[in-house]
Amino acid sequence: MMAILKSEWNLTSSQTSNIGSSYLLGIVLGNILSAFLVDKIGRKTTFAFSTAISTFLCFKISFTKAYIEMILLRLFFGMIFGITYQLGFIILSEITEAKFRGRFSMSLSLLFVLGKIFLIILCFAFLDSFEAGNWEGLMLFNVVPLSIASVLSFLFLKETIRYQLNQGKFDQAFKEIETILEENGREEHLLDEEEKKGLQNWQEKQKAEFQEQQLHKYGIFSSEYRTITLLLWLIFILANFQSMTIYLLMPFLLARKNSGFSSMLILFSFEFCFSIIIYYFIDNPHYGNRIKIIAYSGFALLLSNVLLYIYQESFLYVGLFIIKIATRGLFSTISILACESYPLYLRSQGCGIAQAVGKIGVIPSPYLLVPLLFFDPYLPFLLMALLSVLILMFACVFDKDKTLKHLETLKDE
C-alpha cells in the first residue's frame, strides 16, 4: 500500500515514511492499552469489540483521499491491531495444556501466513502491480472477513477459565469447566466439592505469592521478573527490526526486479510449508524447544542477511524466503515465550508492554531504512546481519523455557 500511495499521490520519501510510522505508532499505543485493558474487561470483550472497530476503520480507509486523514486512520487501525495481536497468543496459551501449548500458539502464526496468501490472491484481482491498482477495493473487500470475525467473537468466544479464577469468579469458572467436560463426553470427570475447594485454595496461595513478590506494586519490574522483562524487550526490538526490513523493503525490491505478485505468492506459500515444520518441532524438548528455535532463527537471519548484502539481486528470492521463514519462527516463538514467562497476574501487562517496546524501537526505522534503500537497496541487510548476532546472544542467556511445563505453578511445586 505504501508503494502504491507513493506513486499515486506523488509522495516524498518522508511522507511515505510518515504513513508507515503512523501505523507502527498505532500498534505501540494499542500494545500499551492492551497491557492494562485486557485484565480490566476480560479477554473476550476486548477481542470482540476490537474486531468490530477494525471493521469500521478498514471500511473508512478504503474511501480516504487525504494524506493527513490516511495517517490518522492508519494510526487508529494500528492501535486496534496492537490490542488484538498478542491477545490471540494469550488466549491460546491459557486454554491449552502444556504438551500442546506451543503447537496451538504456532497455529495462530500459520493463520497469519494463510492471511498473507489470501491477500496476494486478492492482489491479482485488484492491483496492476506493486505500485498501481485499485487499493481502495482491496481494503473494502477485507471488511468481509473482519465482519465475520467480529460477529463470531461476540457469539462464540468464551472468557478463559484462568482469567475467571484469577478474578475470583469461581462459580463462573466451575460452570465453564463442567460445560467443557460435558461437551467432550467426559461427565465422569466433573469436579466434586473437594476439587473445587482445592482450586480455590490454590488460587489463594498464588495471590499470596504475588503479594510477597510485590507484583501489585512493581509489576513486571518486580525483582522476580525484572531481568526477564528487559531480555524480552531486547528480543522484541530485534525481531521487529528484522520484520520491518521485509515489511518496508520487499515491495520496492521486487518492483525494481520487475517481479509480479506471483513471486510474493511463492514466497508466502513456502513460508507456510516451513511454518508447518516449526509447528511439529516447537513442543519437542530435544530439537525444537522455544530457545532452540530462536537460536535457529538468529543463525538463519545472520546467514541470509550477509549473503543478500554480498550477492544482492542474484540472491534476492532465496534470501527473502529465508528471512521470511526465520522471522516467522522468531515472532511465533517469542510471542509464546512472553506468555509463558509471566504469571496470569502479569501476563497481559508483560506481553503488551514487550510488544509496545518492540514497536517503539523500530518507529524511527522507516526514516533510516527508506533513505538507505535509495542510497543502496541492499545496505539495510548488512545492518540486519549485525543485529542477528544479538539474537544469538539472547538465545544463550535466556533460561526461562516452559516447553511441556505447566503455565501456572507455585514456588513449592
Image (tube, rainbow, N blue to C red):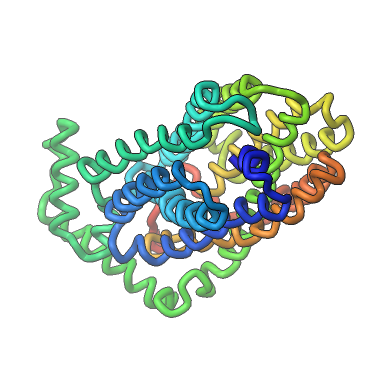
The quadrant the C terminus occupies is bottom left
Give the total of numbered labels: 0
* Residue at image coords 81%, 48%: 372
Q: Please state if 372 lies on the left or on the right of 86 as rendered.
A: right
In this view, the residue farthest toward the right is 310
Q: Nearer the viewer, residue 405 or 90?
A: 90
* Residue at image coords 18%, 46%: 177
Q: Position of residue 128 (x, y in %)?
A: 60, 25
**Above-or-below relation of 145 to 128:** below
Q: Please state if 371 lies on the left or on the right of 173 as rendered.
A: right
Q: Position of residue 281 (x, y in %)?
A: 54, 31
* Residue at image coords 79%, 36%: 303
Q: Position of residue 266 (x, y in %)?
A: 62, 21
Q: Nearer the viewer, residue 347 or 409?
A: 347
Q: Position of residue 269 (x, y in %)?
A: 57, 22
The quadrant the N terminus occupies is top right
Q: Nearer the viewer, residue 288 or 120?
A: 120
Kindly tell me whether residue 49 is visible in this rendering. Answer: yes
Kindly tell me whether residue 292 is visible in this rendering. Answer: no
**Above-or-below relation of 397 to 213:** above
* Residue at image coords 46%, 51%: 77
Q: Please tell me in which quadrant of the rendered image residue 357 appears.
A: bottom right
**Above-or-below relation of 328 to 277:** below
